[in-house]
Amino acid sequence: MFKTLFLIVATVVAVNAEQHTVHFDNRCGFGTPTLIVGGRVVSTGGDFTSGGPITGAIAYLQTGACGFNGEGCTMVETTLVNPNNGPGSGSSTDITLIPPNQFFISRCYRYFNGCDGSGADCTNANCPTAFHKSTDTFVQVACQVNNVNLAITFCD
């Protein structure tokens, strides 16, 4: 009886577990899409799916010109997390051009599986949808949906 109850509870927990995917679309014909989470490379172009939140992740197209943390290139910063603590506690994504980052190639990102189509494009060094200084918080795009995913396109 206890074993059966445990299996039922474990199945319900697994079905309701938080999950997020970051998908890359490299239309440049060169470079390696790179996703770093917690100081560790977790993807070099393939989809990355987490079995929980993705916090403080950075993504960029490594062409040999970017530092390990995207220095010298245009970078996407993201946190994908279910909004369990009320408004403003969910996912947030942005593009940064704050030095030492700089415009390198165009890119865009879009949420999918929730907040579909919400995101930003950056096609030049003056793009208004990117951080240029730390106070440009208006460029962050939030999503308050459970298990939202993110698609990042290079050379869009």
Image (cartoon, rainbow, N blue to C red):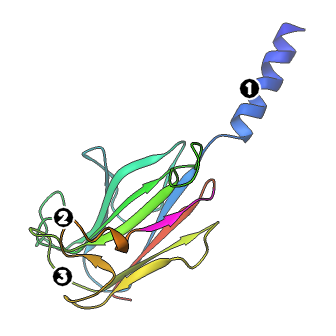
Q: Quadrant of the N terminus?
A: top right
Q: Which mark is residue 10?
A: 1
**Left or right position of 74 against 95:** left
User: How many angstroms separate mark 3 from mark 1 (CA)?
Assistant: 47 Å
Location of residue 123 in the rendering, given as x and y in whole percent from the top left corner:
30, 90
Location of residue 46 in the rendering, given as x and y in whole percent from the top left corner:
43, 63
**Left or right position of 123 against 90:** left
Location of residue 11 in the rendering, given as x and y in whole percent from the top left corner:
77, 31
- The earlier-in-sequence mark between 1 and 2 is 1
User: How many angstroms separate mark 2 from mark 3 (CA)?
Assistant: 11 Å
User: How many angstroms separate mark 1 from mark 2 (CA)?
Assistant: 39 Å
Q: Which mark is residue 96?
A: none
Residue 27 falls in image quadrant: bottom left
The part of the chain drawn in magenta is 141-145
Q: Are marks 2 and 3 in contact (CB under 8 Å)?
A: no
Rate crowding at label 1 as few (under 14), some (14 to 19) or many (20 or more) other CA atoms within 10 Å. few
Q: Element at badge 3?
A: loop
Rate crowding at label 2 as few (under 14), some (14 to 19) or many (20 or more) other CA atoms within 10 Å. many
Q: Which mark is residue 103?
A: 3
Q: Which residue is mark 2?
A: 70
